[in-house]
Amino acid sequence: MKKSILDYTLRIRIPLVLFTAAAFCAATYFLSRPERDGIGYAPIQPIAFSHKLHAGTMKIDCKYCHTGAASSPTASLPAVSICMNCHTVARKNKPEIIKLTQYYEQGIALPWKRVHRIPDYAYFNHSVHVNRGIQCSNCHGDVEHMDVMTQVSEFTMGACLSCHRSAHENLKNIPGIKNGPENCATCHR
């Protein structure tokens, strides 16, 4: 009798438990991937801001508000003074512009919540990519159609390497583009 219980445990129970555990781990890994990679992240901002209106309808260039994109490693979040270049005149009586004006008059920086983030141990230089003609939408999506800024791409090592390894295929609109560097020190400094 003991031998048949032991035999049943070794042949049926243990493999079933191991299979269930492996299936659970695999399902958790794949189902939680968008959350881990930030895809779909769209925090509520202190001022309701529509990229669809500004970048889409009004055709304001990304680099007008994100001043560092072409000249520094970070694209930078817009300062209130940049917003006020237009909003000292435009739509001054709207509730969100009134809030914006209060930040400006009090000299307080807007506490924007960052949407796109790479890990602290990785280095990324916006200006290198922008100055090579790579469009913001390649990484940030069709921002000109977003009322609420949402992360649509993963910012993982795999995603960056995929683009670096096949830049000529991914960026056909840029003639003569070469693949990006793949050595570790490019991003891990």
Image: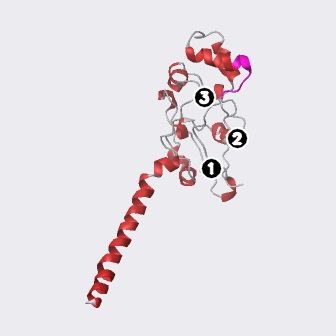
Quick one: label 2 or label 1, which is nearer the N terminus?
A: 2
In the rendered view, would you say 138 is above or below 180?
above
Q: Quadrant of residue 92?
A: top right
Estimate the x, y position of residue 51 in percent, counting from the top left: 53, 26
Q: Which residues are magenta?
A: 104-110
Compute the Cα span from label 3 to label 1. 23 Å
First along the sequence among labels 3 and 1: 3
Residue at x 66%, y 58% (from the top left corner): 184
- Foreground disc of the pair 3, 1: 1
Can you give x and y, in whole percent of width and height, for residue 124 in the image? 66, 46
Helix, strand, or loop for circle 1? loop
Q: Tell me if residue 177 comes above or below residue 57 in the rendering.
A: below
Mark 2 touches mark 3? (CB < 8 Å): no
- Residue type of the residue flagged with mark 2: Pro
Quadrant (top left, top right, bottom left, bottom right) of the N terminus:
bottom left
As shown in the figure, which amino acid type bears the numbered disc 1? Pro
Residue name at image x 60 percent, y 28 percent: 62
Residue hosting label 2: 73
Q: Residues within 10 Å of mark 2 (few under 14, many from 20)?
A: some
Q: Is residue 176 above or below residue 4?
A: above
Specify few, some or many for label 3: CA neighbours under 10 Å numbering under 14, 14-19, or 20 or more: some
Write down the quadrant of residue 45 in the picture: top right
List x then y, in percent, for residue 132.
64, 39
The label on residue 62 is 3
10 Å crowding of disc 1: few (<14), some (14-19), many (20+)? few
Seen from the viewer's position, the closer of residues 12 and 115 is: 12
